[in-house]
Amino acid sequence: MMAIRELKVCLLGDTGVGKSSIVCRFVQDHFDHNISPTIGASFMTKTVPCGNELHKFLIWDTAGQERFHSLAPMYYRGSAAAVIVYDITKQDSFHTLKKWVKELKEHGPENIVMAIAGNKCDLSDIREVPMKDAKEYAETIGAIVVETSAKNAVNIEELFQGISRQIPPLDSHENGNNGAIKLGKQTTQMNRRCC
Amino acid sequence: MADNLPSEFDVAVIGTGLPESIIAAACSRSGQRVLHVDSRSYYGGNWASFSFSGLLSWIKEKQEKTEVSEESEDWRKLILETEEAISLSKKDTTIQHVEDVCYISQDSAEDIEEAGALSKLPDLGGSDTNETAQQSGKGCLALDKQLGTKGCEMSPETIASNDRECTPEGEDTEVISERESSYDATSGHSTLETEKTENASTAEVSNLEPKKITYSQIVKEGRRFNIDLVSKVLYSQGLLIDLLIKSNVSRYAEFKNATRILVFREGKVEQVPCSRADVFNSKQLTMIEKRMLMKFLTFCLEYEQHPDEYQDYKDCTFSKYLKSQKLTPNLQHFILHSIAMVSESDSSTTDGLKATKKFLHCLGRYGNTPFLFPLYGQGEISQCFCRMCAVFGGTYCLRHSIQCLVVDKESGRCKAIIDHFGQRISANYFVVEDSYLSEETCTNVCYRQISRAVLITDQSVLKTQSDQQISVLTVPPVEPGQPVVCVIELCSSTMTCMKGTYLVHLTCSSTKTAKEDLEPVIQKLFILNDEKETESENGGGLEKPRVLWAVYFNMRDSAGIDRNSYDSLPPNVYICSGPDCALGNDYAVKQAETIFQEMFPKEEFCPPPPNPEDIVYDGDGTQPEDPGFSISPEPKAEPLPEESSNIENKVTEEHNE
Ligand SMILES: Cc1cc2nc3c(=O)[nH]c(=O)nc-3n(C[C@H](O)[C@H](O)[C@@H](O)COP(=O)(O)OP(=O)(O)OC[C@H]3O[C@@H](n4cnc5c(N)ncnc54)[C@H](O)[C@@H]3O)c2cc1C
Ligand SMILES: Nc1nc2c(ncn2[C@@H]2O[C@H](COP(=O)(O)OP(=O)(O)OP(=O)(O)O)[C@@H](O)[C@H]2O)c(=O)[nH]1
Ligand SMILES: [Mg+2]
């Protein structure tokens, strides 16, 4: 029986770079040209094998709070990894990438695995950001970097596999949640004794 | 900022405190287009929590007597002849008498920066546009009435130098690694260790000298702190827990159960036995006392069925009633102060019985005390509701001040707000947090005050085998008429303070300034100065914990204000109050529900989100009439047999129309 590890992954990046499309492609292998600016997608999950573990990604989308730079610190809490997305056809979106990294360092957990996705690589004829720039930048911050196309399903799986590989193996004595309580319907295991 | 803010919404919510955030979530959930703004750069208003450097910036801001620059009144031009403007407050006056004191040497702290961190206060978004700079300037709230503030003995400048500008990335990483090594050296184990291992290893450690924590360590590890402006816990059968579960907002947060209830009696801190098992195992109670207590508490659980038992005492205080029962003074004290947690002088017997019953009912749901505490602090809760609101399409803008409400003269209803850019944003309903109202609007309002202190200490007030205790302690008044002080001591596993320290919150309703109200209690429980007196052979565990750093402040308590005492409010403007003095959050939840029901009497309040399994992520936002019949897309990965019953590959896509 393989152990399942829940890994929270949060998405960052300017509006319209394709964050939701990447998740949608990864989780459902589906792409929609007319995807509405993120309203919805609270989080999605997908489980993939990694070595002798199963990684269950809980992928959080920004819910649009990034649009006016109002992401709540709770968005980053407990994230194992962050995917920071830019659009290779928009220099601006690469420029702001650095701000997202900074914000992540400010609010995110330490040791968070960072993955940079240069999305929309199917549009490389109108490219504005050279791959080299992204590679160089990623190196300075120790992040994974890959160019993706949510549209053509390029490197999406690879992106998450890359993250999986960077996640340190589970410590034998680590039980993950440190005794924290998640509320919900399932938390009624404490049976009340009758008198 | 790529997007322009739309100028039409259904509901505009001003302030991101708990009640406003719940209302925003509820409205958005029921399909309203919600705009949710806050003039500050952080979520939560007076419900916020801060890292250490964030708190220092907050303190500094509240201590500065900045005069509000004469704001241009350009927006007046946007008001039509048929309209009237109600201007909103330009500065926050809800926090007073802010005073911070450092009790440990700060010599080496000058060049230290919080690792990897920027202050939360200015420019949180990291946007570097001039626009934002202006915004935060305008959005910044200052305080003028700093009566009695003696100034701080510690200058925040020394460490808050990194407030405004960000450290280059390279430096960040450097500091982080430095922090990590020093962290490991002091704590001896990593954060990821389970509580069990912690307990085991600290059993040895606690026999040694308590590690000396330096000020520069606190600064460096500043991000480990999540310091709440309000100190509250969640009753495990309380309204907030119910709402979190019902609305599914609970999935955004994690909690810890308070591990013990403490009482301060005859100069000593003791643990109150809560569960039946505790009562039986208690060494403080005699056999007879145990029976008395069991009998009495069992009665309290169903006191309504036995009205004859307390009929004669209905109009007396609960403490009188307890005296009349067969209970030793010891037990009376436990029940009054730590179980019922009601006032000795003015709580009725029925209040006391009701509170005792509530306490007992909450026991055992998640652990053996009735209280839950959110990881990373109370400030997370309002953010969780905001996320819910955003998930259903709510629009979020921090650092966004609103200059005025625009009222239609004829109908008397509010029709729009004008923001600091002079943009006019219309809506049908307006929810405004009390602190945003101008002095004119509040002239006739009489506010109470809350006295608060937050301490960083080096040991628990009651040391045990485990150093990971979350304790709730009530300190009865020394003299009648003085306030009861509620103390919540948090350990590092609550993610609110660094390893090796405790975060202690003290709260009472104000009779004087926070310092005057709370310092006497602090002196009883802690050592305040840096003297070495404790090194005298006090022996095992008797010495008090040392306060390393402290802040005091008074906060306006705007709960329970009658709507009519605000001057000329349009009927479609609803006022939310700031935090109240109570230990739980019931007031905020009730207020949010009441306001929501007034706005939308036919809508359900925060119903559970549609079952994720039933929703098809099909991008165009259309949803099947009966979601029950649609089938969620097949998972791509091979589903595990035992997981197929779970929500796997789920898409919590919620429609936007
Ligand atoms: C003196 C006293 C008398 C009471 N009398 C009554 C009464 O007559 N009737 C009544 O309904 N309530 C009574 N209560 C309230 C009752 O204690 C609580 O409702 C609740 O504690 C019931 O759970 P319990 O008795 O199973 O747990 P307790 O024996 O009270 O133990 C408390 C704690 O032990 C642990 N624990 C207990 N069971 C489990 C489990 N299955 N799995 C994991 N951990 C567990 C948990 O941490 C739990 O919270 C009384 C409480 C007190 C203090
Ligand atoms: N050509 C191309 N278009 C893409 C790709 N990924 C996304 N898009 C398009 O880019 C637009 C924005 O995609 P989203 O996934 O909504 O982007 P987002 O980052 O989630 O945006 P917000 O939710 O508004 O923050 C949509 O019209 C997508 O169809 C891609 O790989 N190639
Ligand atoms: Mg999106």
Image (cartoon, coloured by chain):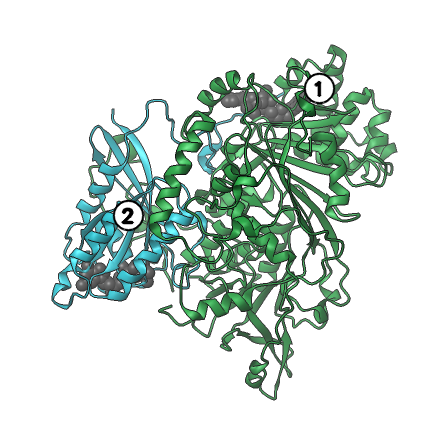
**Chain of the residue that carries numbered disc 2 in the rendered image:** A
Of all residues shown, which one is farthest toward the front?
Answer: B107
Report the quarter where the C terminus of chain B lies: bottom left
Mark 1 Cβ and ligand 1 under 8 Å apart = yes
Toward the viewer: B208 or B640? B208
Q: B14 above or below B612?
A: below
Quadrant in the rendering for residue B472: top right
Q: The cyan chain is which one?
A: A
- Ligand 2 location (quadrant): bottom left
Q: What residue type is labelled 1?
A: Met
Q: Which chain is green?
A: B
Q: Does residue B382 appear in the picture of this structure?
A: no
Helix, strand or loop status at disc 1: helix
Q: B268 above or below B183?
A: above
Mark 2 Cβ and ligand 2 under 8 Å apart = no
Residue B507 spot, x, y in % from top left: 69, 42
Answer with left or right where residue B203 lies relative to residue B514: left
Residue B605 spot, x, y in % from top left: 53, 54
Q: Which residue in the structure is indicated by mark 2?
A: A141
Toward the viewer: B522 or B39? B522
